[in-house]
Image: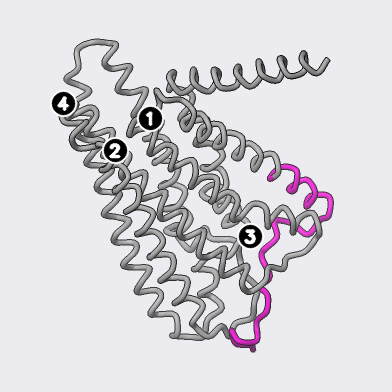
C-alpha cells in the first residue's frame, strides 16, 4: 500500500509487451501525430494568412485547430517515447499535467463545437442578423468563454483529484493519465467528492449536447425550405463537416465512458481511447477540408506560394 505523498511516478498501460509491436506502434503513432501536426498547422497558417478567411466560421475553426494541436501533443508524444524506450513510466507531475491538459483541451473543444453549431444556426436561419449576432467582438468573447470555462473546469478537477490519497498503487489502466483511471487508485470512499464534480460536468456537457441538437434541428428545417440546389449545397458544405466532427467526438467519448461493464476490457479501453483522443485531432483537418472548397483553394494557394518561393530562392542561389 502507498499514498500519494510517496508516489514519484505512475505506470501507464502498454498496448503490448512485444518489442517488435512496440516499435510498430511507435511508427504508427508517429505517422498519425505528423498528420495531425501538418493538417492543423496548415489550417492555422492558411486562416491566419488569408484575409478572405477572416470570418467568424474560420475564426472558430482556427481555435479548434489550436485545440487539436494541443490535445494530440498532450498524449501521443509520451506514448511514442515509452514505446521507443520500452518503458511505462510517467512522472507524478507529468501525470498531473496530462490530466489537466487533457481535460482542459477536450472541454474547450466540446464548448467550441457548441459555439460553432450556434454560428451555423445563425448563418443559415438568421443570415440578415449574422453580422450583428456574430461580430468580431462577440466571436472573441464566445471563444474566450469556452477556453476560460474549460480552464477553470480542468483546474478544479485536477486539484481535487490529486488532493485525494492514492492507496491502490501507481499503475494507471490507460496509455495516458485521465481522471477515471487515477480515481481507481484512491482510497475507498475518498473519491466521492470528485465523482460528484464529474456528475456536474456531465450535466453541463449534456446541456451543450442539447444545444447542438436544437441548433441542427433548426438548421435542417431551414435547409428543407431552400428551393435552389446551390443553396442546399452551400448549406450542407458548411454544416456537414462540423456535424461529422461533433458526431465523431461525442460518439467515441460516450462509448468510452458509458459503455456497459459487460463489454469492458483493457484492450477495448485502449482502442476506444485512441478513437476519442488521437484520431479526432488528426482527422478534423481532413473532414473540414473535404467539402469546403474555399478552404481547399486557400490551402493550395498557400502551398503554391511556398513552392514558388522555394524555386525562386534555389534559382537565385544557383
Q: Is residue 10 above or below residue 22?
A: below
Return the disc, 3 or 4, that comes first in the chain's sequence: 4
Q: Give how far apart the Cα atoms at labels 1 and 4 are.
A: 19 Å
Residue with the mark numbered 2 = 136
Question: Which picture quadrant has residue 173?
Answer: bottom right
- Compared to residue 180, the image places residue 129 above or below, namely above
Q: Which residue lies at the image location 46% right of the left edge and 25% below the top edge?
A: 50
Mark identifier at residue 175: 3
Residue 83: x %, y % from top left: 76, 55
Residue named by callout 4: 128
Describe the element under mark 2 as helix, strand or loop.
helix
Q: Nearer the viewer, mark 1 or mark 4?
A: 1
Work out whether residue 64 or residue 224 is closer to the camera in this orientation and state it: 64
At mark 3, the secondary structure is loop
- Give coordinates of residue 184: x percent, y percent: 53, 75
On the picture, is 59 further left or further right than 302? left
Mark 1 Cα within 10 Å, few/some/many (few <14, many 20+)?
Answer: some
For mark 4, give the secondary structure.
helix
Residue drawn at point x = 35 percent, y = 51 percent: 144
Question: Crowdedness of circle 2 by 10 Å Cα count: few (<14), some, many (20+)?
Answer: some
Within 10 Å of disc 3 (Cα), the crowding (few <14, some 14-19, many 20+) is: many
Rendered image quadrant of residue 268? bottom right
Residue topped by disc 1: 54
Q: CA distance from mark 3 to mark 1?
A: 38 Å
The image's colouring method is one colour
Q: Nearer the viewer, mark 3 or mark 1?
A: 1
User: For residue 236, what is the image quadrant?
Assistant: top left
**Disc 2 to disc 4, C-alpha distance:** 16 Å
Amino acid at each position: 500500500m502507498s499514498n500519494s505523498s510517496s508516489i514519484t511516478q505512475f505506470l501507464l498501460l502498454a498496448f503490448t509487451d512485444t518489442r517488435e509491436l512496440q516499435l510498430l506502434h511507435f511508427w504508427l503513432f508517429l505517422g498519425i501525430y505528423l498528420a495531425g501536426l501538418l493538417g492543423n498547422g496548415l489550417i492555422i497558417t492558411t486562416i491566419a494568412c488569408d484575409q478572405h478567411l477572416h470570418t467568424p466560421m474560420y475564426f472558430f475553426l482556427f481555435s479548434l485547430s489550436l485545440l487539436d494541436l494541443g490535445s494530440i501533443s498532450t498524449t501521443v508524444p509520451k506514448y511514442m517515447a515509452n514505446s521507443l524506450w520500452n518503458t511505462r513510466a510517467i512522472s507524478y507531475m507529468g501525470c498531473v499535467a496530462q490530466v489537466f491538459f487533457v481535460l482542459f483541451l477536450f472541454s474547450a473543444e466540446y464548448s467550441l463545437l457548441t459555439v460553432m453549431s450556434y454560428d451555423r444556426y445563425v448563418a443559415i436561419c438568421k443570415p440578415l442578423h449574422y453580422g450583428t449576432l456574430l461580430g468580431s467582438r462577440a466571436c472573441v468573447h464566445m471563444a474566450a468563454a469556452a477556453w476560460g470555462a474549460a480552464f477553470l473546469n480542468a483546474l478544479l478537477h485536477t486539484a481535487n483529484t490529486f488532493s485525494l490519497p492514492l492507496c491502490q498503487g501507481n499503475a494507471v489502466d490507460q496509455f495516458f493519465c485521465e481522471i477515471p483511471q487515477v480515481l481507481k487508485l484512491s482510497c475507498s470512499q475518498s473519491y466521492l467528492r470528485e465523482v460528484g464534480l464529474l456528475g456536474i460536468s456531465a450535466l453541463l456537457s449534456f446541456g451543450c449536447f442539447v444545444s447542438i441538437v436544437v441548433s441542427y434541428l433548426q438548421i435542417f428545417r431551414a435547409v428543407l425550405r431552400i428551393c435552389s440546389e446551390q443553396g442546399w449545397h452551400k448549406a450542407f458544405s458548411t454544416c456537414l463537416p462540423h456535424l461529422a466532427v461533433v458526431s465523431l467526438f461525442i460518439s467515441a467519448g460516450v462509448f468510452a465512458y458509458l459503455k456497459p461493464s459487460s463489454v469492458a476490457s483493457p484492450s477495448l479501453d485502449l482502442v476506444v481511447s485512441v478513437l476519442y483522443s488521437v484520431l479526432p485531432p488528426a482527422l478534423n483537418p481532413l473532414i473540414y477540408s473535404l467539402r469546403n472548397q474555399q478552404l481547399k483553394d486557400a490551402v493550395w494557394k498557400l502551398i503554391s506560394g511556398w513552392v514558388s518561393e522555394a524555386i525562386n530562392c534555389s534559382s537565385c542561389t544557383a
